[in-house]
Image (cartoon, coloured by chain):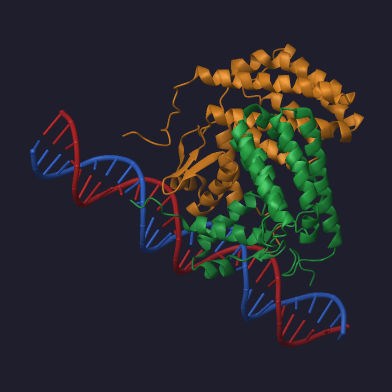
Chain colours: A green, B orange, C blue, D red
Amino acid sequence: MERNAVSAVDLVYEALKSKILAQEYLPGIQLKEMQISKELGLTRTPVREAIIRLEREGLVSTVYNRGAFVTVFSTREIEDLFEVREALEIKALTLAIRRSSRDEIDSIEKALKQRELRIKNLVIKSDMHDPELDFHLAIIRLSKNQRLISVWQTMQSQLSLVRVTSTMINRRYLRALEEHKKILALVRNGDLRRAERLLIRHIACAKGNMLSSLADVTGGEPEGGAIRRST
Amino acid sequence: MERNAVSAVDLVYEALKSKILAQEYLPGIQLKEMQISKELGLTRTPVREAIIRLEREGLVSTVYNRGAFVTVFSTREIEDLFEVREALEIKALTLAIRRSSRDEIDSIEKALKQRELRIKNLVIKSDMHDPELDFHLAIIRLSKNQRLISVWQTMQSQLSLVRVTSTMINRRYLRALEEHKKILALVRNGDLRRAERLLIRHIACAKGNMLSSLADVTGGEPEGGAIRRST
DNA sequence: CTGCTCAATATTGTATACAATACTTTCGCT
DNA sequence: AGCGAAAGTATTGTATACAATATTGAGCAG
C-alpha cells in the first residue's frame, strides 16, 4: 500500500501556486491548461482540478469558456483584504494573550532579535521572503485557532500577489521591527488595549505602503496580456 | 453567442450545495461521483470539479483515493469558527457605523419588525430559514466589504452544517430579536463600544446554544456511514 | 486603410476509456 | 466457527477523445 503517494493534482497545484507567488506567472496572464500539462508531463485533467483549487483560494480567476487568469486585484479589493486581515489579527491578539505561554513568546522574541542582527549587518537578500510576514504569522499562530490561521494565510497569499517594490520593503524593515518588538512586549504583558492600537497603526502603515507602491506602477499592464484583449 | 449559458459544473455545484445545506446529504456520508452524475444525467467530470469547489469551501472533505465526504465538524472546529465569525462581525460593526446610511439601517429595522410580528402570531414554519442569519448577514453587508461578506458567508455555511434542534432555535427567537433591535439601535447611534459588547454576548449565546445542542446528540452517528468504517 | 465576414485554429468544457486503489465477498484452511 | 488470502467489485485518479466556444487571421468590399 503506497503510503506517501501524492496525487498529480497536488503536484500541479503546488507547482502553479509557487510560480504564481514567485511572480513567475504575473497577475493577468492566462493559465493555459495544455501548456501547463505539457510542461509537467501530465494531461489536462489534473491541471484543471488544480486550477479550480487555486480559483477557490482567490489566486486565480476563471471566466466560463475563456479560461483561468492569475487574479488582478483592484485597489478596492486590496483595501478590503487589509480590513479583513486587521480583523483577524486583532482577534488573534486577544486569543494569543489568553492562550500563549511565556516560552512561545520568548521564541518569537528570539527570532525577532536574530532578524534585527541580520538586517543591521546588511545581509538582506532580495530573495529573502518578507520578514514582516513571519512576525504576523507567528502572532496568528499564537491564537491556536486553526481556522483563523488558514483564513489568514489565504488572505496573505492573495495580498502577496500585489507586487511591492523591494526598496519600499527594505526602507521599512527596521521601523517595522521596532513595532513588532513593542507589540510582542504588550502581548507578553497582557495589555490587549495597547497592543491592538499599535497593531492597527502598524497594519495601516503596511497598507499605505502597499497602496502607494501600487500607485507607482499604475498603468503598468503586466506583460503576457490582460484578461481581455482589445484587438 | 449564448449569453446565459451555464456550465454543468455550476449545476452540479448548486445541486450538491443545496442538498448539503438542506441536510439531505448528512455530514459524514460519502459523495459518490458515479451516483451523483447518474442522478443529474451527466458524467463524472463536472461532478468531480464541483466537489473540488465544495471541498475548498469546507463543506466537503476529501481523502485521496477514498473519496469525498460531507464534512463532520468537531466541537473544536465549531468553536474556532465562532471565534472567526465574531472577529468578522465586530469588524463589520465598525465599518457599518462608518459607512451605512440611515436608510439602510431603517430598512433592516423594518425587516426586524415584520419578523417580530410573524413570530408573535406564531407563524413559524419549520422550514423557514434561520432568521438569526438574516440579521447578521444584514450587518455584515453594511460593512460594504465584499471580501468580508464572502468569508463570512463561507463560515456561515459551514456552521449551518451543524444541526441545531429547531426547538432550540425557536426558544431563542424573541430574545434574539430584542438583542438584534438593540444592536441595530446602537449602530444607528454610532455607539461602537456598546454595540460590540452586546454583539459579543449575543454570539457567545448562539455558540453556547449550538454546542449544547450538539452535546444532546453526542454519539448519534450520522446514518450512511462515517468516513472510516471499522469493519 | 478600415471594417466586415468567414474559415482556420486554439482553448475550454464534457464525455468516455483506462489504470490504480480500496472495499467486499468468497473460499479454503486450521 | 474464526481467520486469512485471493478473486471480484466498486470507486477514485488520470488519460484520451470529442464537442462547443472563443480567438485569430485572411480575404474582400467600401
Q: Is residue A53 visible?
A: yes
Task: Name the side, left or right, on which A63 lies relative to A174.
Answer: left
Q: How many marks?
A: 0
Q: Where's the C terminus of chain A, which quadrant?
A: bottom right
- Residue A111 or residue D27, whichever sits in front: A111
Task: Name the side, left or right, on which B35 lies relative to A39.
Answer: left
Residue B189 percent across, percent down from the top left:
90, 23
Residue B143 percent across, percent down from the top left:
81, 36
* Rendering quarter of residue D29: bottom right
Task: Name the side, left or right, on which A153 lies relative to A164.
Answer: left
* Rendering quarter of residue A81: top right
Q: What residue is drawn where x is 72% and y is 62%?
A: A28
Residue B216 percent across, percent down from the top left:
51, 17
Q: What residue is drawn where x is 90% and y is 30%?
A: B103
When the figure is inspected, residue A222 is found, relative to residue D5, above or below; the finding is below
When the figure is inspected, residue B73 is found, relative to residue B212, above or below; the finding is below
- Residue C2 or residue A75, whichever sits in front: A75
Q: Is residue B100 visible?
A: no
When the figure is inspected, residue B147 is found, relative to residue B82, above or below; the finding is below
Residue A11 percent across, percent down from the top left:
51, 58
Q: What residue is drawn where x is 77% and y is 47%?
A: A176
